Image (cartoon, helix red, strand yellow):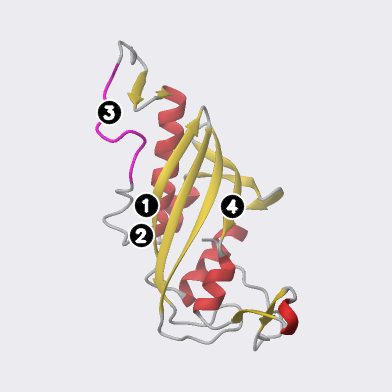
Amino acid sequence: MVPGPAFDGPQAGAGGGPRNGAGGSGSAVRGAVILSDVSSTSQDVVRRVFEATNARDVEGLRGLYAPEFRLNGTTTTFDEFATGFGQFFAAFPDARGAVDQYVVEGGTVAARWTTEATHLGDYAGAPATGRRVSWHGTTMYRIEGGKVVEMWQTADLLDLMQQIGAVVPARRTAGGGPIRFQVRPSRNGDGAPGGPL
C-alpha cells in the first residue's frame, strides 16, 4: 500500500453513521462496531501519534505520550523513546506509516500498519542501499487521560532486514533440514536491528 496523506487509512465500516437505531449521544456506529466517546477519543490519540511521527514532530509526540510509559513490557521515558526515532529516521528519512486497520475497545487501540521508506543511512549495521522498502506491523496502545501509557509493538523486521541485505534470505539446508538464516555482522558489532517503527 502506498501511503496517502497523513493517515487516510481505512476506518472500521467506512462511511458509517448510526445504523439499526444505535448510535445515540456519545457513540458512532461504523459497521458492526460501536465506538464510545472513550473509544473514539483513544483512536484519535493514535491517529495523531501517526500524524506526528510522519511529520517528525517530536514535541507533538511528547504531548501524546505519558512522560514514562510501558513499551513491550518495559518502562521507558519519552526521551529514551525519542532517541530511537532519531536513529531510525537517520536511516529512513522519508519513512511514512499508514494505518491499514484500527480495532478499538475502550481505551485500547490496535493499529495494523504499513511503513514505506528509502534506506538512505546505516541501519542495524547495514550501510545505505538506496532501496525502497516496506514492512508491516501491529501496535497496541493503551490510552489514559488522552496519553499513551502502554504500547506493545510487533513488526516484520526480518522482512525489512532481508530487503536491505542485512540478513541473507532463508534457504533449506542440504537434505531438506530446517530453514537457516544468516545475520550479516554489523559494522559496529552490535547486530541489533532497533528502530521505533
The amino acid type found where label 4 is placed reads Gln
Mark sitting earlier along the chain (1/3): 3
Separation of residues labelled 2 and 3 (CA atoms): 29 Å
Mark sitting earlier along the chain (1/4): 1
Q: Is residue 185 above or below residue 181?
A: below
Q: Quadrant of residue 84?
A: bottom right
Predominant SS along the magenta part = loop
Q: Report whether 154 appears left or right of 44.
A: right
- Are the residues at dot 2 and dot 3 in contact (C-beta closer than 8 Å)? no
Mark sitting earlier along the chain (2/3): 3
- Are the residues at dot 3 and dot 4 in contact (C-beta closer than 8 Å)? no
On whether residue 17 falls in the magenta region, the answer is yes
Q: Nearer the viewer, residue 4 or 69?
A: 4
**Residue 57 visible in the snapshot:** no
Q: Residue at x 53, y 87 (%)?
A: 127
Which residue, given by chain and number where applicable, does mark 3 sit on?
A: 16
- Are the residues at dot 2 and dot 1 in contact (C-beta closer than 8 Å)? yes
Which residue, given by chain and number where applicable, does mark 2 sit on?
A: 55
The amino acid type found where label 1 is placed reads Glu
The amino acid type found where label 2 is placed reads Ala
Q: Is residue 73 above or below residue 53?
A: above
Which residue, given by chain and number where applicable, does mark 1 sit on?
A: 51
Residues drawn in magenta: 10-19
How busy is the neighbourhood of tag 3: few (under 14 within 10 Å), some, or many (20 plus)?
some
Separation of residues labelled 4 and 2 (CA atoms): 20 Å
Which residue, given by chain and number where applicable, does mark 4 sit on?
A: 153
